[in-house]
Amino acid sequence: MVKNYNWGVLGPGKIAHQVSAAIVSTGRGKVFAVGSRDLSRAGAFASQYKAERFYGSYEALIADEDVDIIYIATPHHLHYEFTKKCLEAGKPVMCEKPATINLRQFEELMHLSREKGVFYMDALWSRFLPSTLKVLEWISEGRIGDIKVVRADFGFKATYDPSGRLFNPALGGGSILDIGIYPIFLSLLLFGYPNDIKVNAVMAGTGVDASCNMSFRYKEGGIASLLSTFLAETDTSAEISGTAGRICMNRLWYRTTSLRLVNGDGESFFNQDYKLNGKEYEVEEVMRCLDAGLTESPLLPLSFTADLMRLMDEVRKQAGVEYKEDLEKIYLS
Ligand SMILES: NC(=O)c1ccc[n+]([C@@H]2O[C@H](COP(=O)([O-])OP(=O)(O)OC[C@H]3O[C@@H](n4cnc5c(N)ncnc54)[C@H](OP(=O)(O)O)[C@@H]3O)[C@@H](O)[C@H]2O)c1
């Protein structure tokens, strides 16, 4: 029998709308409860998604015994604190990217999830999209030979607001954690962890990176050339090149529905629209894992997210981006 899941949405902001619509679209997920810092905001969001309950604090949402899984959609700086509270309360959790501010925070949560046997997944939705699965399939079939070069960017012109979540260091701002995470994720998925990392960054007035260029080198002779920026409208495409051909992930590659493969046989195309907005794939993955009694996703295991956080720590170190959470390391470890 198909099990239905009561989702609790924690931090009902912009992205929470997309994921809530996706939860509803699956037919077996329900936006059951909403937690906001403000009761009236929680109520308004709850009525939009026909949620039965709403709370004026995140803690009250986590304490609701009828909530099966919490989706955390706050700015970055709160991911660690509320994922920890969920895991301690035995509540499965899917948390928005980046999972945490740094590796130290993530490792603590990973150990907690394993110790308590409670499901935990980073909401890196691109991992579950049909286009990403197709890229992996084409590569495993040898359609482009051995991968040697990955190029990926993610850039847009953001309005400079020193207090907003994109530029404010207190909220974990900066292009690396917010959008650089996508190209870094792609390189990690395709090449694994690099042997050499070189970084060049342009800083915003708030001390976080506004642009970041990354060059990763791999043992087997691979190179990844990656870029994130809040300063310019870049193509936001990705190209994966191998000894026998290449795969082009078209504009807005991290959410693309179309791919082009070029090799000695000519061109092949992949086009597949989402069922809704693309978030339904991560939502379905969570419910599939919960059905199977898993505590992490085989497609996006915690060890992968740990490597992603480790890589972003190193990139930030070279870029000169430090958050107050990094300094806590000195006292806690
Ligand atoms: N997967 C994706 O495609 C995608 C896209 C965009 C963003 N994201 C991620 O989703 C997270 C949220 O991004 P967003 O654009 O949805 O953010 P947002 O709308 O600015 O904020 C989300 C919610 O967080 C709560 N919040 C708690 N403390 C806050 C604070 N100090 N400042 C502002 N809001 C605070 C607010 O809800 P209440 O006050 O009502 O509790 C707010 O509505 C980020 O971690 C981001 O990386 C993911």
Image: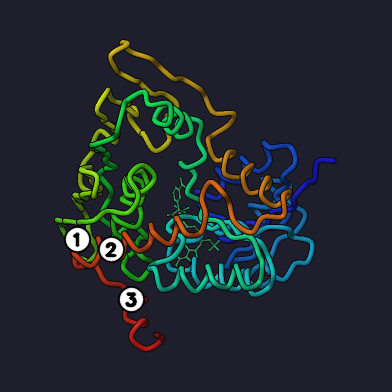
Q: Are marks 2 and 3 in contact (CB under 8 Å)?
A: no
- Cα distance in 3D space between marks 1 and 3: 19 Å
Badge 1 amino acid: Ala
Residue at the image point whose x is 61% and y is 44% from the top: 285
Viewed as shown, does residue 167 lie left or right of 196?
A: right
Element under disc 1:
loop
Residue at image mark 1? 204
Q: Are marks 1 and 2 in contact (CB under 8 Å)?
A: yes
Badge 2 amino acid: Pro
Q: How crowded is mark 2: few (under 14 residues within 10 Å), some or many (20 or more)?
A: some
Which of the two discs, 1 and 2, labels the residue nearer the N terminus?
2
Q: In which quarter of the image is residue 260?
A: top left
Residue at the image point whose x is 28% and y is 48% from the top: 158
Badge count:
3
Q: Are marks 1 and 3 in contact (CB under 8 Å)?
A: no
Q: In this view, does 8 lie above or below 171?
A: above
Element under disc 3:
helix
Quadrant of the image containing the C terminus: bottom left
Of tags 1 and 3, the one toward the viewer is 3
Q: In which quarter of the image is residue 325?
A: bottom left
Of tags 1 and 2, the one toward the viewer is 1
Badge 3 amino acid: Asp
Element under disc 2:
loop
- Cα distance in 3D space between marks 1 and 2: 9 Å
Residue 66: assigned label: none
Residue at image mark 3? 326
Which of the two discs, 1 and 3, labels the residue nearer the N terminus?
1
Residue at image mark 2? 162
